[in-house]
Image (tube, grey):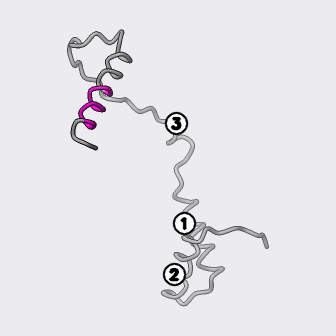
Amino acid sequence: MRTTVTIDPDVRVLIDRRVRESGRPFKQVLNEALRKGLSSAPSSASRTRSYRQPVFDMGRSRTDLTKASALASQLEDIEAIGKLARGR
């Protein structure tokens, strides 16, 4: 079957390198690479496996997070004042 495909430049370099190394035609190298890549692709069953994120108890917060935005703003102000004092 004949079709037109746009190959990214980096992929073209990889294919050309394999053609030179193996001495096989471009078409054969490309088809083998596609077969290998598509046959090793994960199946839909393996993609749906759930992942459990480990969770750790870090204890009570030492800072009242209800005003976290105000705290972040104050920290940015302190940093900016420090930079100005250092002449940056």
Mark sitting earlier along the chain (2/1): 2
**Residue 23 pos. (x, y %):** 54, 90
Mark sitting earlier along the chain (1/3): 1
**Residue 2 pos. (x, y %):** 79, 73
**Residue 69 pos. (x, y %):** 38, 18
Single out the mark in the foreground, 2 or 1: 2
Above or below, 42 relative to 50: below
Q: Residue at x 62, y 86 (%)?
A: 25
Marks 2 and 1, how far apart at CA: 14 Å
Q: Residue type at mark 3?
A: Thr
- The quarter holding residue 58 reads top left
Is 5 a magenta residue? no
Q: Residue at x 47, y 35 (%)?
A: 49
Disc tally is 3
Which sits in the foreground, 88 or 5?
Answer: 88
* Disc sitting over residue 72 in the figure: none
Q: Which residue is mark 3?
A: 48
Q: Residue type at mark 1?
A: Lys
Q: Which residue is mark 2?
A: 18
Above or below, 38 relative to 1: above
- The quarter holding residue 29 reads bottom right
Residue 45 visible in the displayed image: yes
Bin the neighbour count of mark 2 within 10 Å (Cα to Cα): few under 14, some 14-19, many 20 and up: some
Q: Residue at x 52, y 88 (%)?
A: 20
Mark sitting earlier along the chain (2/3): 2
Q: Which residue is mark 1?
A: 36
Helix, strand or loop for disc 2? helix
Q: Residue furthest right?
A: 2
Question: Is the residue under label 1 in contact with that under label 2 (CB below 8 Å)?
Answer: no
Which residue range is magenta in the image? 76-84
Name the quadrant of the N terminus.
Answer: bottom right
